Image: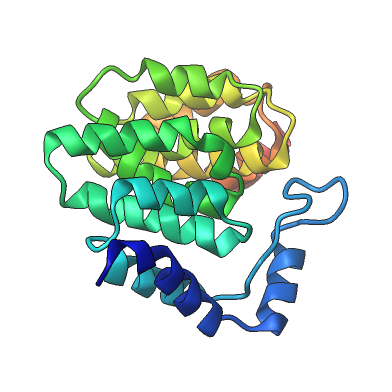
Amino acid sequence: MKKINILEKINKELRAKSTPARAKSSAWYFKTGKGQYAEGDKFLGLIMPDQRNIAKKYAFLITLKDTVTLLQKSKYHEQRMTALLILQEKYKKSDTEEQKQIFDIYLANTKFVNNWDLVDITCKNIVGAHLFDKNKEILYNLAKSNVLWEKRIAIISTFYFISKNKLADTFRIAKILLLDKHDLIHKAVGWALREAGKKDPVMLKEFLNKNIYKMSRTTLRYAIERFSEPERKNYLKL
């Protein structure tokens, strides 16, 4: 397979799997209308399994340079998703040097990781995985960003740490984001707190007891989702 044809082949396969009906429903679901968080984004209309399959098929046939081109130059949401999934596949099987390169590419291109699904499906296994045993200052910088998606990357990346039973950064970043005004951050923080609470319910309750008056009701509802009904009612009264 010639390198020059890789992007054409990927885009051809993406289009072959797309449907106008799904494109229309995706545009509605991902809030692309005027004034909404994904205003102007365009969809081909693919289901996620097809995007994953195409990404896996081409992950080791496409160069990093062409993957970045697919991410940066694409008109459609699913093309960006496929590029990010390819980066994720490459990261899993790369050596330390190339993993660092992929991590740097991801963070240099956050303007293209511009919807919650793009963030949630890919940042944990690139940003989170890469920073697990390293300095995590970049996550705290992202949490203080003015860009919605960078803030979401900050908290969702810590899901990798949670999976390894390392919870401190999740709670610290959650605290930074508690006063954020966007519903997508309220949900992400609550989700992260809930998952951390599965690992250590005591830490979660201590966090809630200290910070409950700072958090949105949406964050609280997500965080206490696995509590007993009496506990949930008690926290919601507060």
The residue positioned 30% from the left and 39% from the top of the image is 102
Q: Residue furthest right?
A: 34
58 vs 39, left or right, is left
Image quadrant where residue 233 sits: top right
In this rendered view, identify the residue nearer to me: 196 or 119: 119
Where does residue 144 sit, x and y in percent of width and height?
Answer: 57, 18
Q: Looking at the image, is 66 positioned above or below residue 169?
A: below
Display coloring? rainbow
Q: How many marks?
A: 0
Where does residue 180 sit, x and y in percent of width and height?
Answer: 68, 26
The quadrant of the rendering that contains the C terminus is top right
In this rendered view, identify the residue nearer to me: 161 or 165: 161
Image quadrant where residue 133 sits: top left
Does the image show residue 229? Answer: no
Where does residue 155 sit, x and y in percent of width and height?
Answer: 48, 34
The quadrant of the rendering that contains the N terminus is bottom left
The residue positioned 53% from the left and 23% from the top of the image is 143
In this rendered view, identify the residue nearer to me: 180 or 99: 99
The residue positioned 84% from the left and 56% from the top of the image is 33
Does the image show residue 20? Answer: yes
The residue positioned 55% from the left and 64% from the top of the image is 78
Q: Looking at the image, is 202 positioned above or below residue 140?
A: below
Where does residue 219 sit, x and y in percent of width and height?
Answer: 63, 39
Q: Residue furthest left?
A: 95
